[in-house]
Amino acid sequence: MTEFVYEALPGRVLFGWGTVSRTPAEVKALGCSRALVLSTPGHRAEAERLGAMLRPCLAGVFSEAAMHTPFSVTERALAEVTRYGADCTVAIGGGSTIGLGKAIALRAGLPQVVVPTTYAGSEMTPVLGETANGAKTTQRSMKVLPETVIYDVELTLSLPASMSATSGVNAMAHAVEALYAANANPVTSMMAEESLRLLARALPVIVQDPHDAPARTDALQGCWLAGICLATAGMGLHHKLCHVLGGSFGLPHAATHTVVLPHVIAYNAADAPEAMARVTRALGTDDAAAGMFRLVKRLGAGQSLAALGMPEAGIDSAAEAATRQPYPNPAALDCERIRHLLAAAWSGEPPPGP
Ligand code: NAD
């Protein structure tokens, strides 16, 4: 007998081409009139452009968002919220910028309009990861779930091929883990499989031609679905390992997900046959782990943790850390098996066959 609990999260989503021009109307629809636009330093020009569009509802632009939402940056942004009398935030960028909007929402209660420009999926989740004094903490709170998300395919055209590949595989990781999560359910599984199908088809096209509009459209839809999966079903060994590797060795977020995913699929394959059947079908392959490894290779993305800067001596400590406060996972967490997994991922070997 199948049993499950499915909890849909609230949120308004606009999807299309040029949809960023609808941001002023969406700010007003939230009853707001003083928006603080957020971005990373690299996205300052886009943030300024969006700010100009928002006038007279623009309070200011804050362009200091950084990876892993450092609390020092949030403090400076909160000071700007007060100084400008902002009544909402408009985040334009990837997971780092969106994280800043969430951190502000948590403390100042400001509603959020989010315009994602990568495939990380944070815009759909009530999850916030922050760093303070070198330590990363993650919390789940409905206070941080963005009210309005505006997906504009046109804004993703500038995402370089290499980042599109790793960010896209980061999204695929959300979908894969949702398929075997303890709280998996028919709705998220359907979304996860469709997300994998869209991304597996679109990403190889995008790395050849980052301006391919149909592939960009599919990829952004796939990432939206993956974000819903991450938000409504859980995370397992893969996300745990990536959090450990990111936190312990400062490895880049999306690139780490890309290296680790095929190996975790292999680790879990025997214990999650239905999930693997869906991954296999979505990838159009005969084996989920091998198929994912081949896809990553085809995308030209890095396949070794060593190349990302992980020291070989860190394998043991990372394996131990992954078994402490573990996330639910279909296969039992065995330190020795995880050590082998990490050793293969470190050197860039393919995952073991079934
Ligand atoms: P990012 O937001 O750090 O962006 C990486 C770089 O790409 C930045 O310099 C940015 O300016 C640039 N960039 C973004 N969009 C671009 C575009 N369209 N064209 C050109 N350049 C562009 O990277 P990310 O992978 O999106 O986010 C990673 C962060 O998000 C991590 O801190 C991770 O922990 C967090 N995250 C959180 C959740 C969640 O649910 N809380 C989910 C996924 C990721």
Image (cartoon, helix red, strand yellow):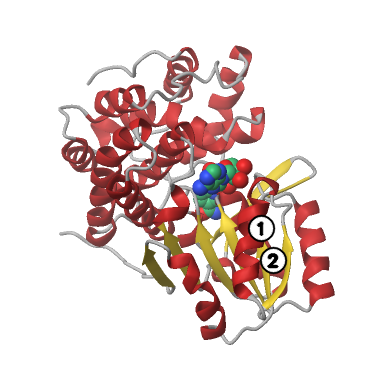
SS state under label 1 = helix
Count of numbered circles in the view: 2
SS state under label 2 = helix
Residue assigned mark 2: 104
Residue assigned mark 1: 100
* 205 lies left or right of 302: left
Q: Residues within 10 Å of mark 2 (few under 14, many from 20)?
A: many
From the viewer's side, name the closer residue of 237 and 143: 143
> Would you identify the image quadrant in which residue 141 lies?
bottom right
Identified at 47% across, 73% down, the residue is 22
Circle 1/circle 2 CB separation < 8 Å: yes
> Would you identify the image quadrant in which residue 303 lies?
top left
Identified at 17% across, 39% down, the residue is 277
Is residue 224 positioned above or below 268 on the image? below
Q: Quadrant of the N terminus?
A: bottom left
> Would you identify the image quadrant in which residue 99 lies?
bottom right
- From this viewpoint, is residue 266 visible? yes
Q: Quadrant of the C terminus?
A: top left
Is residue 123 positioned above or below 316 on the image? below
Percent coordinates x, y for residue 67 in the rendering: 65, 44
Instruction: Measure how far apart labels 1 and 2 are at the Cα level.
Output: 6 Å
From the viewer's side, name the closer residue of 175 and 214: 214
Percent coordinates x, y for residue 8 in the rendering: 36, 70
Q: Which mark is residue 352?
A: none
* 267 lies left or right of 141: left
Q: Amino acid at mark 2?
A: Ile
